[in-house]
Image (cartoon, rainbow, N blue to C red):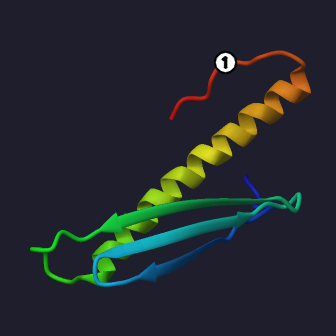
Amino acid sequence: MMHTTVGWHVEMEFREDDQRTQAVALVRLPDGTEVRAHGHASRHRTDANQPRVGEEIAGARALNELAMRLLTKAHDEIDQASGRTSHPIHV
């Protein structure tokens, strides 16, 4: 049986105007480090103004970047612990 020993909470913040949405994703890890990433979305002038859609796109892009940053962090930690260059971690 698996037991949860740690949990992560991701915070998302958005800034918007009529044409653009910017998102910032932040996760605080148990070791005290913070990993932050950004995403954006732009509305074409002929599209309807749907802020939620802009948030979803910008948020997804920020979370995707956050995932890549976490993979890179893990990869670097593997290299440091092993003293050698490891194989790249692929998504």
**Horizontal and vertical percent position of residue 77:** 82, 35
**Horizontal and vertical percent position of residue 73:** 73, 41
Residue 91 versus residue 3 in the image, above or below: above
In the visual, does 22 lie left or right of 84?
Answer: left
In the visual, does 60 lie left or right of 76?
Answer: left
Q: Residue at x 66, y 18 (%)?
A: 87
Given the current orientation, which residue lies at the most extreme left position?
46
Q: Nearer the viewer, residue 37 or 42?
A: 42
| Figure quadrant of residue 40 | bottom left
Q: Secondary structure at mark 1?
A: loop
Residue 50 versus residue 79 in the image, above or below: below
| Residue corresponding to mark 1 | 87
Q: Residue at x 67, y 38 (%)?
A: 72
Q: Residue at x 32, y 81 (%)?
A: 52
**Horizontal and vertical percent position of residue 27:** 69, 65
In the visual, does 19 lie left or right of 48?
Answer: right
Q: Amino acid at mark 1?
A: His
Residue 80 versus residue 53 in the image, above or below: above
Q: Residue at x 14, y 81 (%)?
A: 48
Residue 33 versus residue 19 in the image, above or below: above
**Horizontal and vertical percent position of residue 56:** 36, 70
Count of marks placed on residues: 1
Q: Residues within 10 Å of mark 1 (few under 14, many from 20)?
A: few
| Figure quadrant of residue 57 | bottom left
